[in-house]
């Protein structure tokens, strides 16, 4: 037990939290921006999965990180574009379209994995690259803080940078204003000449870029290969984070960190012979509990954060 | 003649649309095979016709379809209520796990074992699904997110129970003890593994069909899904409807998972979540939440799966191709506007020619 506490109080714990947080923070920002425009992007999970595999395949073939990142983002954007097209042009319900795309991504990645790596489990047979880690000058020499903050994968730092970028997009650009306008009141937005579909499309595409980065991190940073269904529900956890954070960037970061800390703590519980299977339920269970507590607290006040103002007459399929 | 064709198109538009979506899906799969296989002719034939080539393969279609029918029904009930409760996968795994554990511990009269095991699976599945239902109805927690997350919790909980309470250490892999034969659903067609689960499935299709379309509670469920505000305005207790529909979803999924174990595996041996709950979503979408059509959609999906397996054996095309085309098919079916302009054109032409005739 004392071992457990000493390992949690060590700087390595905080280091691990950043690692765990990165692939949640990206899709959470993605969920946030599409949520602001009024669409619940269930497909984040699938977008991450596709990008994770494309990054691995392209880096293995080209041995170029830039090509890999560009290709993976392009693939993620393509999935987001399909979602937007099917939802906005073909009028499919976004939840059903999202579920369909997740099923597609799960099957498609295994399909492609088998064709390229001759395995249905992982991409170990491919000589794929890793995104580099970064030692931050000066900071790395500070005793405790250095161990926590320096030496992370470059995508972890980009994730931290993505938070202010998100803030700027949402609060300081015309697009951000329009996204919020469309999300809060599509009719009012139309009356000022905004076309909600175009704005929602843009929000979904930005959301796709965020999710793609999360996917790339999973297969080229967090882990060194692609694994079947390796996103393991992070896209769904991200949706919950965005709801609790009310789509606000700083809160997304804080909740992302908090969730990641809980998940990391759960992993550390393994050292005191806590049953592994139960440890694996913790991230999902915790997320549900936090969501429930949030709803309990928020029950008395109006909730502007509902991802989509669902038309009551809307009916699945 | 022209008018009759137009009439037909307008009347059966939804059906025609579904068929076209399916044909597009099959065309894409043929395209994939042509791309990947040097001499594709044989592969295409074995993918499309292989499932009908032997009795055992035809049997495979029905074996696979039987849990999918139940999961499709499960999802259809929630979707009819306008709830995106996609927790069938979790209810199925947890229900099957609880039912298996109960079956292993059961010491009562032999003839009671099958109904009791099924009831336990149904109740556990139903209670599990009740959680997101209550959270949605009472707190407004989004049922999509909650059920997606709870599916993971359910699977790991089930694995925990299997590993710690009912694991057969001699199996060589993670599996429960084998159920006593008194808990097996008999396979009744020689040469196949088709078991009584499919008969139960058909019976429950009838029950759900009757429930949804011939009882007042079923009517309230459909009304809530059709127009929530209207339902509330006319005095429907929305909270009750959401909770009940979630419970029914879990019950049906729990039974679906349990019959698969009682009829095929005879022990809990899922190393990963079996995915039949997701097949249920696919099937419910293809069937447009109609219980009777769920049967056909489930048989169709199983047919594709069997075809995919035959294809994998005879060529280098992985069976996951089926997952790709099934997603394309349901995307096209959920896309309300897909072919809608065609329907509009036909409708206009029809009314114009009807007026000209008059």
Image (tube, rainbow, N blue to C red):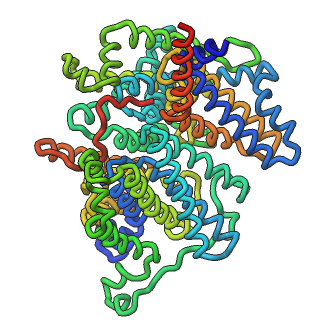
- Is B66 or B167 nearer to us in this picture? B66
**Count of numbered circles on the image:** 0
- Tell me where residue A149 appears, x and y as whole percent: 35, 80
Instruction: Decide if residue A246 is on the left or right side of residue B84.
Output: left
Residue positioned 66% across, 43% down in the render: B320
Residue positioned 45% across, 43% down in the render: A87
Asked if A24 appears above or below B18 in the picture, the reply is: below
User: Residue B120: which quarter of the image?
Assistant: top left
Q: Is residue A96 left or right of residue B176?
A: left
Determine whether A9 is above or below B150 in the image: below
Q: Nearer the viewer, residue A242 or B162?
A: A242
Q: Examine the image and state in which quarter residue A113 appears.
A: bottom right
Residue in view at x 56 percent, y 30 percent: B342
Residue B134 coordinates in the image, percent (x, y): 26, 31
Q: Position of residue A177 (x, y in %)?
A: 27, 61
Q: Quadrant of the C terminus of chain A?
A: top left
* Residue A68 shows in the view: yes
Residue B294 position within the rendered picture, expressed as x and y whole percent measured from the top left: 54, 20
Tell me the quarter of the image containing the N terminus of chain A: bottom left
Q: Is residue A256 left or right of residue B186?
A: left
Q: Quadrant of residue B251?
A: top left
Residue drawn at x 31%, y 44% is A308
Residue situated in front as seen by the camera: A304 or A211:
A304
- Among all residues in the image, which is located at the extreme left? A300
Query: Visible in this render: residue B266?
Result: no
Please say if B163 is above or below B81. below
């Amino acid at each position: 037990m004392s071992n457990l506490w000493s390992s949690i109080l060590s700087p390595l714990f905080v280091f691990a939290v950043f690692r765990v947080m990165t692939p949640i923070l990206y899709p959470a920002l993605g969920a946030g921006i599409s949520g602001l425009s009024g669409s619940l992007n269930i497909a984040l999970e699938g977008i991450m999965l596709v990008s994770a595999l494309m990054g691995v395949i392209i880096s293995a073939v080209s041995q170029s990180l830039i090509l890999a990142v560009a290709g993976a983002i392009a693939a993620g954007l393509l999935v987001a574009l399909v979602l937007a097209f099917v939802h906005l042009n073909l009028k499919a319900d976004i939840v059903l379209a999202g579920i369909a795309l997740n099923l597609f991504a799960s099957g498609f990645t295994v399909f492609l994995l088998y064709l390229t790596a001759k395995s249905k489990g992982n991409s170990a047979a491919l000589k794929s690259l890793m995104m580099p880690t970064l030692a931050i000058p000066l900071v790395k020499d500070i005793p405790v803080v250095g161990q926590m903050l320096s030496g992370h994968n470059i995508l972890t730092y980009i994730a931290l940078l993505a938070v202010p970028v998100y803030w700027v997009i949402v609060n300081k650009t015309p697009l951000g204003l329009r996204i919020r306008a469309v999300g809060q009141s599509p009719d009012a937005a139309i009356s000022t000449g905004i076309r909600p579909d175009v704005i929602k499309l843009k929000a979904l595409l930005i959301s796709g870029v965020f999710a793609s980065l999360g996917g790339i991190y999973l297969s080229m940073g967090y882990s060194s290969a692609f694994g079947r269904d390796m996103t393991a529900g992070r896209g769904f956890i991200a949706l919950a984070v965005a709801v609790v954070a009310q789509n606000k960037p700083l809160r997304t970061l804080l909740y992302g960190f908090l969730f990641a800390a809980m998940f990391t703590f759960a992993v550390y519980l393994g050292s005191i012979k806590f049953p592994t299977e139960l440890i694996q339920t913790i991230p999902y269970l915790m997320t549900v509990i936090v969501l429930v507590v949030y709803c309990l607290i928020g029950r008395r006040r109006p909730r502007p954060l509902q991802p989509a103002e669902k038309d009551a007459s809307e009916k699945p399929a | 003649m022209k008018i009759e064709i137009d009439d037909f198109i307008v009347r059966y538009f939804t059906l025609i649309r579904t068929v076209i979506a399916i044909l597009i899906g099959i065309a894409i799969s043929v395209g994939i095979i042509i791309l990947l296989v040097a001499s594709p002719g044989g592969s295409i034939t074995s993918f499309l016709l292989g499932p009908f080539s032997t009795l055992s393969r035809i049997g495979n279609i029905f074996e696979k379809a039987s849990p999918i029918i139940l999961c499709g029904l499960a999802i259809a009930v929630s979707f009819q209520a306008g709830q995106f409760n996609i927790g069938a996968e979790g209810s199925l795994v947890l229900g099957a796990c609880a039912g298996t554990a109960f079956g292993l511990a059961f010491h009562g009269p032999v003839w009671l074992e099958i109904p009791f095991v099924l009831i336990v699976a149904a109740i556990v599945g139903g209670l599990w699904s009740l959680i997101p239902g209550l959270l949605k109805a009472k707190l407004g927690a989004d049922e999509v997110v909650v059920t997606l997350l709870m599916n993971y919790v359910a699977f790991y909980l089930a694995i925990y129970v299997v590993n710690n309470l009912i694991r057969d250490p001699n199996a060589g892999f993670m599996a429960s003890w084998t159920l006593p034969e008194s808990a097996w659903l008999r396979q009744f067609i020689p040469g196949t593994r088709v078991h009584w689960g499919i008969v139960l499935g058909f019976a429950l299709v009838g029950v759900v069909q009757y429930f949804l379309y011939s009882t007042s509670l079923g009517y309230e469920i459909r009304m809530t899904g059709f127009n929530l505000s209207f339902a509330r305005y006319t005095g429907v207790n929305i909270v009750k409807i959401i909770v009940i529909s979630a419970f029914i979803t879990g019950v049906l999924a729990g039974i679906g998972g349990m019959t698969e174990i009682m009829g095929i595996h005879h022990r809990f041996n899922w190393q990963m979540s079996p995915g039949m709950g997701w097949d249920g979503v696919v099937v419910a979408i293809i069937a447009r939440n109609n219980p009777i059509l769920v049967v056909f959609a489930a048989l169709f999906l199983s047919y594709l799966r069997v075809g995919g397996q035959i294809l994998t054996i005879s060529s280098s095309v992985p069976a996951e191709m089926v997952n790709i085309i099934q997603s394309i098919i349901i995307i096209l079916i959920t896309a309300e506007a897909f072919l809608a302009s065609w329907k509009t054109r036909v409708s206009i032409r029809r009314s114009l020619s009807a007026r000209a005739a008059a």
